[in-house]
Amino acid sequence: MELTTIKDKISTTNVTEAQKNYLVNTLENEFQDKKIEKKADALLKINKNISEEKLTLKLMEYDFLTTSNF
C-alpha cells in the first residue's frame, strides 16, 4: 500500500500554495495534538479519515483568518 501525505492528497484539489500549506500544517497539528507518536501512523490515519468536507471547512477557516481584521 502506498502512503500518501496530506500535501499529496491536497495537491489534487484546486487550492493555492498558501492554502495548501495552511491545510497541511493545521491537519498535521490536529493529529500531533492527539499524541500519535509515529508519523507514518499519523499520515495513515489522516488519509483514512480526511474528507472533502473537512478540506472545505479548513479552506473556509483559512479564508476567514486571512481576510478578517481582528
Image: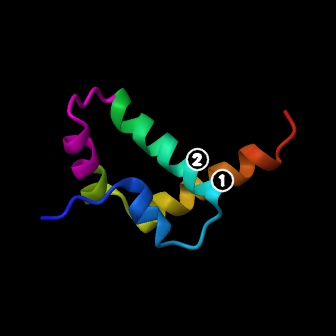
Residue, disc 1: 18
Q: Which mark is residue 22?
A: 2
Query: Does 53 appear above or below 44?
Result: below
- Report the residue that reaches farthest toward the left: 1
Determine the secondary structure under disc 1.
Answer: helix
Q: Where is residue 25 in the image (x, y as percent from the top left)?
A: 50, 41
Q: Quadrant of the C terminus?
A: top right
Residue ID at (72%, 54%): 63
- Report the residue that reaches farthest toward the right: 69
Relative to 19, 1 lies left or right? left
Magenta-colored stretch includes residue 44: yes
Relative to 29, 22 lies left or right? right
Q: Quadrant of the N terminus?
A: bottom left
Residue ID at (28%, 48%): 43
- Between the residue at mark 1 and the residue at mark 2, the CA separation in whole angstroms equals 6 Å
Q: Position of residue 17 (x, y in %)?
A: 63, 58
Q: Where is residue 34 in the image (x, y as percent from the top left)?
A: 31, 30
Residue ID at (29%, 57%): 47
Amino acid found under the numbered disc labelled 1: Ala
- Image: magenta residue range: 34-45
| Classed neighbour count for the residue bearing mark 2: other residues with Cα under 10 Å, few (<14), some (14–19), many (≥20) | some
Q: Decide: marks 1, 2 in contact (CB < 8 A)? A: yes
Amino acid found under the numbered disc labelled 2: Tyr
Relative to 2, 60 lies left or right? right
